[in-house]
Image: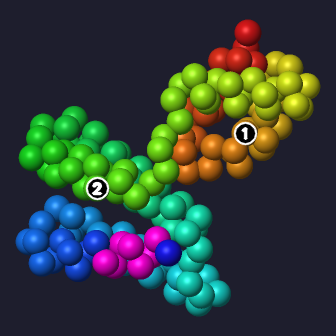
């Protein structure tokens, strides 16, 4: 199970004195625990943990960008390092070509035409890309294909 792997890797990071990995895994495990407690007080499935990891990665990317724009390169680099640790636990990200192909299939499947059909296409595409591509990238491709 993914949670057990995170816990095992945290123990390894503690023994190796790997500060970045230790800090990142502690934060992620805290987020997972908070998610478990906020719901029906149950253990999260691996898919749900992947969603938590993706959310944490998104936070790191946004924070790194904000720090970089604010002239705080050291903090931006720390956020990027944490993001790199998180990416190791996420499924391989889809390429732009793979996203385009999935969007094309969804458009054919739904018979969608024009920008107004974006919601219908996204409804079909999202389960297929879950955790393997950022929503913004998928939405941009859907808009691009529906516009043409």
Q: What residue is shown with label 1?
A: 125
Q: What color scheme is it? A: rainbow
Q: Identify the image quadrant of residue 77.
A: top left
137 to 78, vertically: above or below: above
Magenta: main secondary structure equals helix
Specify whether 122 is left or right of 3: right
Q: Is there any visible trace of residue 94 in the rendered image? A: yes
Q: Identify the image quadrant of residue 97.
A: top right
59 to 105, vertically: above or below: below
Q: Is there any visible trace of residue 63 in the rendered image? A: no
Taking the spot 21% from the left edge, 64% from the top edge, the residue there is: 21
Taking the spot 78% from the left edge, 28% from the top edge, the residue there is: 105
Where does the image place residue 134, in percent across and percent down from the top left? Answer: 52, 41
CB within 8 Å, label 1 to label 2: no
Taking the spot 69% from the left edge, 44% from the top edge, the residue there is: 128
Where does the image place residue 103, in percent across and percent down from the top left? Answer: 71, 28
In this view, the residue farthest toward the top is: 148
Where does the image place residue 93, in percent across and percent down from the top left? Answer: 49, 40
33 to 75, vertically: above or below: below
Q: Nearer the viewer, residue 116 or 98?
A: 98
* SS of the residue under disc 2: helix
Q: Which residues are magenta?
A: 2-8
Q: What residue is shown with label 2?
A: 85
Examine the structure image and report whether residue 4 is included in the region drawn in magenta: yes
């Amino acid at each position: 199970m993914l949670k057990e792997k995170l816990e095992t890797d945290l123990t390894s990071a503690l023994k190796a004195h790997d500060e970045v990995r230790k800090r990142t895994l502690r934060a992620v495990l805290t987020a997972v625990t908070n998610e478990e407690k906020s719901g029906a007080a149950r253990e999260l499935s691996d898919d749900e943990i992947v969603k938590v990891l993706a959310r944490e990665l998104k936070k790191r990317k946004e924070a790194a960008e904000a720090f970089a724009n604010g002239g705080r390169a050291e903090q931006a680099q720390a956020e990027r390092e944490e993001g790199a640790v998180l990416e190791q636990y996420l499924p391989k990200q889809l390429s732009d070509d793979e996203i385009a192909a999935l969007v094309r299939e969804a458009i054919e499947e739904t018979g969608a035409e024009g920008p107004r059909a974006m919601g219908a296409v996204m409804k079909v595409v999202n389960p297929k890309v879950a955790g393997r591509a950022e929503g913004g990238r998928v939405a941009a491709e859907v808009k691009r294909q529906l516009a043409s």
